[in-house]
Image (spheres, rainbow, N blue to C red):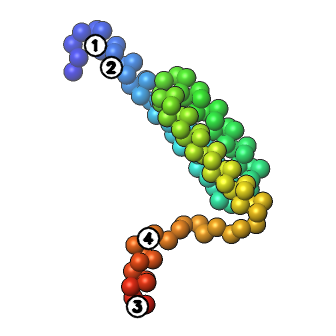
Amino acid sequence: MAHSLSAQKRIRQNEKNKARNKARKVAIKDQTKLFTTALLGGDIVKAEGELNKLTQKLDRTAAKHTIHKKAASRKRSRLTKRLNVAKAVKASGVVVPAKPASKKKVVKKAAKKS
């Protein structure tokens, strides 16, 4: 337990900041889930809107130093790349499996057949 007044105040400030940062991070995770469900549902227009909202939240959170600005940029870039791939797939009409088979499973199946 802190004894000095300044140490007690610092504890109170840390609790407030921790709650604020946690709320910002949870908001980013929730928005990411909305984007992902829209993208997996095949709704490209809705996914674009969700990505736009997510980008704003990432930038604001990075500006307030809750997350690093390069971490926000990296997440934004990866999600934008996923959206662009989904757009290209939808435009070409090619069906892509939801989860590609791992290399180990393919090798095991080939070994069993031999």
Q: State the quadrant of the C terminus.
A: bottom left
The residue labelled by disc 3 is 114
106 with respect to 91 (left or right): left
Query: Given the image, on which type of amino acid does mark 4 rest?
Result: Lys
- Tell me what residue is drawn at x 53 percent, y 38 percent: 74
The residue labelled by disc 4 is 103
- Tell me what residue is drawn at x 61 percent, y 33 percent: 57
Helix, strand or loop at mark 1: helix
Q: Is residue 34 visible?
A: no
What separation in Å lies between label 3 and label 4 (alpha carbons)?
Answer: 17 Å
How packed mark 1 is, by other alpha carbons closer than 10 Å (few <14, some 14-19, many 20 or more), is few
- Tell me what residue is drawn at x 64 percent, y 67 percent: 96
- Tell me what residue is drawn at x 44 percent, y 70 percent: 103
Residue 111, how many percent across, how many down? Answer: 38, 85
The residue labelled by disc 2 is 11
Q: Is residue 36 above or below residue 94?
A: above
Query: Given the image, on which type of amino acid does mark 2 rest?
Result: Ile
Label 3–label 4 contact, CB within 8 A: no
The residue labelled by disc 1 is 7
Q: Is residue 11 visible?
A: yes
Query: Given the image, on which type of amino acid does mark 1 rest?
Result: Ala
